[in-house]
Amino acid sequence: MRRYNILKGKSKLNAQLGNAAAMASSGVYALPSMIQAMQHPDAAVRYWGATGVGNIGPQAINAKRPMMDALKDKSPSVRIAAARALAKLGEVKLALPVLEAELQSEHQWGRLAAAIVLDEMNEQARPSIPALKKALVNQPNKYIVRVANRALNELLGTNHVVR
């Protein structure tokens, strides 16, 4: 029944989720809302909270502790969004192990999300070159391979093509 209500837009969660998603791109004034979203029981709301912190970037320094806690979240999407946020807060050494682990996880869309974040990190992702190379093989879809390849091309100055 819960899924039906969510899909039909008849739940309190829809409003909370919509608010968190909208606030995630609202800038530094939304930081208290993003930190509060990290305590929500629903992973989708926590994801948007962590994404919002990452979108704010260095000005979200007050969110460092909630993002560190979120690295252990049960949801891969939340862990990846928290790692992205921490990288933007200058905590790359905390972020990379989580992203590398997700790059090899059983969740193919989590693998893709981790590859996207590593690609977005540019030079900060340099220590993850071995993990990105490993991500080029045995993937369930080509998107993961293409994103990992792009990140490697940028980091290594190569021009390898995925076929």
Image (cartoon, rainbow, N blue to C red):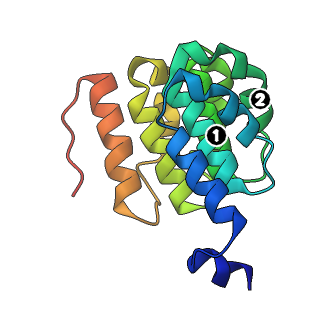
Q: Residue at x 56, y 38 (%)?
A: 51
Q: Is residue 68 left or right of residue 90?
A: right
Which quadrant of the view contains residue 158? Answer: top left
Q: Residues within 10 Å of mark 2 (few under 14, many from 20)?
A: some
Give residue 70's mark. none
Q: Amino acid at mark 2?
A: Pro
Mark 1, secondary structure of its residue: helix
Q: Residue at x 29, y 39 (%)?
A: 150
- Give the x, y percent position of residue 134: 49, 44
Circle 2 residue: 66
- Give the x, y percent position of residue 19: 59, 49
N-term-proximal mark, 2 vs 1: 1
Q: Residue at x 74, y 57 (%)?
A: 42
Please name which of the two marks, 2 or 1, marks the residue nearer to the observer: 1
* Residue 88 versus residue 36 in the image, above or below: above
Mark 2, secondary structure of its residue: helix
Q: Amino acid at mark 1?
A: Gly
Nearer to me, 76 or 44: 44
Quadrant where the image shows the N terminus: bottom right
Quadrant where the image shows the C terminus: bottom left
Circle 1 residue: 49
**Residue 133 can be seen, yes or no:** no
Question: Do residues under tags 2 and 1 come within 8 Å of each other at their CB atoms?
Answer: yes
